[in-house]
Image (cartoon, helix red, strand yellow):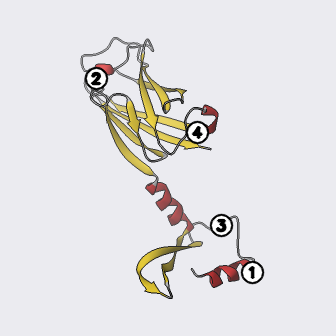
Amino acid sequence: MDILNWLYIKTQGLVRTEANNAKTDLVALGANVGFQKRDDQYQTYAMTLADAVNSADAANTAYYTLDYGIDGFIIDVTTTKGVIEITNFAADVPDPAFATAVPLIIQNSDITFGNPDNLYLQLSVYYKPTIDDNFIPYLLATGAILGQEVAIFNANPAVAGANQGTGFLYVYYELYQF
């Protein structure tokens, strides 16, 4: 959008802080279209506010895999939210009834760790057990020095089954610095 359009919007008092309807209100954007037009490679286009928010949200979400037996317990992420699939976890399953914990450290180079008062963390866990697997994962944030430090406990008080921890462990996270 060229500057004259922005000046018109501003002078007419059309700048707002709230949308009327996110499904129908349009947001003007510019994209590099790769050809010269009036000495400007950018062309204006519009999308609904709802579509803009959803596409930005999808671009900021990713899927990661951590092989706990090979890579260890530290994972580097590049998005503020996503899914971490932890594979090869069976040998490191914590003891039943919260007796022990194993670590998980989520690192992101865009976040300065060290002051947990400036971090927002939300964790959700999904575990699909296999036959004779009674592992019930329980995650607890424990610090933020090397990254977001998380302890993984086994909440099930029963004795470990033969296939303990061989199921599918997914950690859904949101991690923001403010």
Q: Give the mark nearer the N terminus: 4 vs 1.
A: 1
**Above-or-below relation of 50 to 37:** above
Q: Give the mark nearer the N terminus: 1 vs 2.
A: 1
Give the class, few, some or many, for how many residues have Cα within 10 Å of label 4's Cα (few <14, many ≥20).
few
Q: Residue 130's quadrant in the figure?
A: top left
User: Which quarter of the rendering shows the N terminus?
Assistant: bottom right
**Residue 10 rendering spot, x and y as whole percentages:** 72, 77
**Residue 105 rendering spot, x and y as whole percentages:** 44, 31
Secondary structure category for the residue under label 1: helix
Q: Nearer the viewer, residue 18 or 8?
A: 8
* Disc 4 to disc 3: CB gap under 8 Å: no
Residue visible at 42% across and 78% down?
33
Residue visible at 59% across and 66% down?
22
Give the class, few, some or many, for how many residues have Cα within 10 Å of label 2's Cα (few <14, many ≥20).
some
Where residue 19 is drawn, which disc sits there? 3
**Above-or-below relation of 178 to 15:** above
Report how far apart the C-alphas of labels 4 and 3 lie in the structure: 26 Å
Q: Residue 65's quadrant in the figure?
A: top left
Residue receiving disc 1: 11
Where residue 120 is drawn, which disc sits there? 4
**Residue 94 rendering spot, x and y as whole percentages:** 37, 17
The amino acid sitting under disc 1 is Thr
Q: Nearer the viewer, mark 4 or mark 2?
A: 4
Secondary structure category for the residue under label 3: loop
